Image (tube, helix red, strand yellow):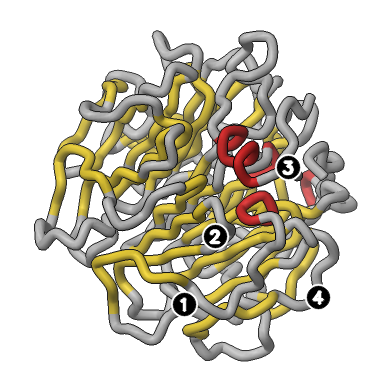
Amino acid sequence: GNCVRMNRTLAAALASFFVLAGCGGDPASSTGRVTQSGSAGAVRYEVPLQADSARLSAGTYFTAGADQDGHVYAWGDNTYGQLGDDATLARPAPVPVAGLSGVRAVAAGGYHVTALERDGTVWTWGNNTYGQLGQGYFSSRVGHPVPVQGLSGIAAISSGYLFSLATHANGTVYSWGRVANANRAGFQPVSGLSNVAAATAGYEHALAVTRSGALWGWGSNKAGQLGTGRPAAIENTPVRIASLDKVVGAAAGYMHSLALRQDGTVWAWGSNAFGQLGVNLSSSRLPVRVHGLPVPVNGASGVKAIAAGTYNSVVVYSDGSVWAWGGNGYGQIGNGTTVRATEPQQIQGLGRAVSATVGNGHIAILMADGSVYAIGFNANGQLGNNTTANAMVPVQVSGPQGAGNLDLGQSRDQ
């Protein structure tokens, strides 16, 4: 159930953002805390605001979603078995991922997927060249879900391009795969971090938000995507992003990052080659505020989700509106053009959204009624509408094998 609602005063809201296991001691029962990420050459991460943010995740050229009953579906590119159907054939409509039930969060990475079950256990499948499945060995692919042995009590997950993160209910972050120039086939705690509410995995960098609202980053910093202002090209251990406090959510993209503060403002830093920072700068090694977004009356509690992908950034508000900016080569920001946008644009043609996720040229959106819409690049079927035609307006994701429409279940977070 919804143990912590977001429609409260700011002081209470800040505290509520960081409750990882607030209901009966079960780390998986506090529906508002799950975070996640995923995308490749793209990536994206969802804020630990609403459980809905954990139910839909875009990888590089594929998408995965979990319904309210804990079943998982996936569609799009399947080169490495990331659709979990023990095949490598691309699927332009959702296919069920066998062998899973009780999933509360799904995180699509570059070419792999991480799933979190309600009992706090983690399952992975897809590409494992760099150990991104956390199985203790390297392999080209695993075509169906396998449990990460020895990992339990997990409250939040995130998948980056070649690595994954899991945040334990006690605030420890575990990492596996390739980040900061090291390949690890088994999970290891990230040193120097504690009391973490949620961590987000990007292309080659990661961010972690602590329960006190501090933000930390590690991994690649080539484009300043760690936000520290330091010139180092890589940080092997987490560094505090000192210029931001009262942070309640973060999103790691390809070479840029986003953060949401308690007051409802959104901040961005890193590469701005496609306008993904939402400001008129070539890049920024320090966080800059994104202007042109509505500022919610109730601060961060008025934001449902933030997400970062390869060249895009997205914010979903409690009124159901979705705002996107950055690259637009496939019309993925829904403004009727293919011209990049350096300031936020509202995606048109949608009803009430509750979360969004960004891949490499496509955006997928979960609606309050459980339907899913997608827009942008579709060469691999990642829009899920049973075609491979790109779309400049949101199209509805089909049901399994193309029959009817996908229904992930009505939002319980409204």
Residue 347, relative to residue 190: is it above or below? below
Quadrant of residue 54 in the image?
Answer: top right
Left or right of 240, for residue 68: right
> CA separation, marks 4 and 3?
30 Å
Q: Is residue 174 visible?
A: yes
Residue 367, relative to residue 400: is it above or below? below
Q: Nearer the viewer, mark 1 or mark 3?
A: 3
The C terminus - image quarter: top right
Q: Residue at x 68, y 63 (%)?
A: 296
Q: Which residue is mark 2?
A: 358
Q: Which residue is mark 4?
A: 349
Residue 291, relative to residue 62: is it above or below? below
> CA separation, marks 1 and 3?
29 Å
The earlier-in-sequence mark between 3 and 2 is 3
The N terminus - image quarter: top right
Name the amino acid type tagged 1: Gly
Q: Which residue is mark 3?
A: 8
> CA separation, marks 2 and 4?
18 Å
